[in-house]
Amino acid sequence: MAVELVIFDIGNVLIEWQPERYYDAVIGPERREAMFAEVDLHGMNDAVDRGGKFRETIYATAEQYPEWRDEIRMWHDNWIELATPAIDHSVRLLRALRSKGVPVHALTNFGIDSFDFAATHYGFLDEFDERFISGHLGVIKPDVEIYEIVEAGCGHAPGAILFADDRADNIAVARQRGWNTHLFEGPQGWADRLVAEGLLTASEAA
């Protein structure tokens, strides 16, 4: 079956998402390692991605760990510095696909408020034909329910979908459901896959 719909993850596919790198730069690797060992910051972020209030969730976590209060609050207060920079080649691929009339959707673990904030910095987040944002759906990848929601709402058979994500566990569930998948390890590999699928020419994917 030919690919009719391309779905992008966002974090580490279109925008670099590297909280550890941010904290290494701000508080140093040793303190960052100690904080991440004590505080489940990624679990906190999952709660936001499931629809929890952005500021309230992070600030409540900060109050549970007074010795790390200021640092945890940075996850909210300096959030855009954790989610930077844009991966420019991936953005070009998104736009090249849309310019050829290929439907392009987003399937992303992202909070409601944090996504809206990101969209004020990254205009391409408003350029998808459809967006499936976990915060609005109340479920995150790799829970099978979020893939079922996409299938019910996208209007395409699983075998006509090509999905790029940077996490192998997210890819594995999509593949089990019959989607075509690409484990994103860099934009050039993704470009090569889109060319191999006949969706873009080599020049269009540059």
Image: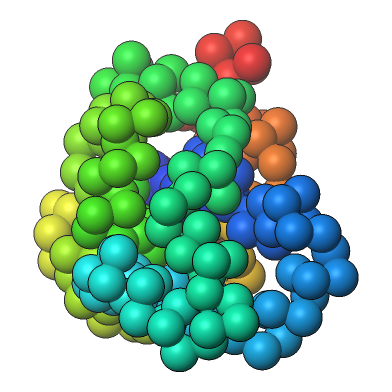
Establish if 2 lies above or below 204. below
Establish if 197 lies above or below 123. below
Asked if residue 176 can be seen in this view, the reply is no
Is 77 left or right of 72, judged from the image as shown? left
The colour scheme of the drawn protein is rainbow
Counting from the top left corner in percent of width and height, residue 198 is at 51, 29
Is 150 left or right of 109, judged from the image as shown? left
Counting from the top left corner in percent of width and height, residue 53 is at 23, 69
Residue sitting at x 62%, y 58%: 19
In the rendered view of the protein, which quadrant contains the C terminus? top right
Counting from the top left corner in percent of width and height, residue 17 is at 58, 51
Counting from the top left corner in percent of width and height, residue 62 is at 46, 78
Asked if residue 54 can be seen in this view, the reply is yes
Establish if 109 lies above or below 194. below
Give whichever of 20, 123 is nearer the camera.
20
Residue sitting at x 38%, y 48%: 7
Residue sitting at x 58%, y 66%: 71
Establish if 23 lies above or below 129. below
Give whichever of 188, 45 is nearer the camera.
45
Q: Residue furthest top?
A: 203
Is 158 left or right of 41, judged from the image as shown? left
